[in-house]
Amino acid sequence: MDLALQVGGIPLHPLLVHAVVVLTPLTAVAVLLTQFWPVARRRLGVVTPLAALAVLALVPITVRAGQELANAIGTPPSVLTHEHYGEMLLPWAAALFVVAAAQWAWFRWRPAPAGGREDGTVRAVTAAFALASVVVAVGITWLLVLVGDSGARAVWGGVAG
C-alpha cells in the first residue's frame, strides 16, 4: 500500500470516508435550504458552494485511497460492489458543486423583479434550479447510502452476519 495513503500506519480510506459521509449530506441539505428558504440562503451564502467544492475534492481522494486499500487486502465481491458504487460518486459530487455554485451565483446576481414581479424567464430559471437541487441532493444522498451500506457489508459482513 502507498505510504502516502496512510496516517500513522492506518489506511487513509476509512478516515476520509467519515469526512465524505458527514459533509456530503450536510451540503445536500444546504443546497435544498438555499433553494427553498430565503433566510437560509442569505445566511449560508458562499458556504454551500465551498462545502460542495470540498466534497468534490474529497471524493476522488477517498476513492483513490480505497483503491489502494483494496489492492492491499484483495477484492472479494463485497469490496468490488463497494468500489463500483464509490466510483459512481464523483459525477454526483461534480453535479452537487455545479448546482451549488450556479445556484449561489443566480440568487446573488439574478435580475431584480420589475414592478415587484419576476418575469417568466426568471421564474423558469429558478424552477430549473429547484428541480436540479432536488435531483442532485436526493441522488447523491441515495448513492452515498449505497456506498456506505456496501462498505459496511464488505467490512462487517462476515462478523455481523
Image: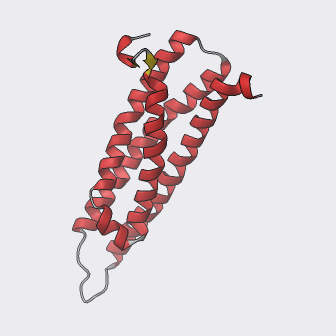
Please indicate whether residue 153 sits to the left or right of residue 128 in the image.
right
Residue extending farthest front: 8
Residue 159 appears in the rendering: yes
Residue 59 in picture, x, y percent from top left: 41, 34
- Residue closest to the eye, 153 or 112: 153
Residue 125 in picture, x, y percent from top left: 36, 67
Residue 137 in picture, x, y percent from top left: 48, 53
- Residue closest to the eye, 93 or 126: 93
Give the image's coloring scheme.
secondary structure
Q: Looking at the image, is 101 positioned above or below residue 84?
A: below
Please indicate whether residue 122 sits to the left or right of residue 71 in the image.
left
Instruction: State the quadrant of the C terminus.
Output: top right
Instruction: State the quadrant of the N terminus.
Output: top left
Residue 101 appears in the rendering: no
Residue drawn at (52%, 31%), measured in percent from left and top? 86
* Marker count (numbered): 0
Residue drawn at (44%, 64%), measured in percent from left and top? 130
Residue 29 in picture, x, y percent from top left: 46, 57
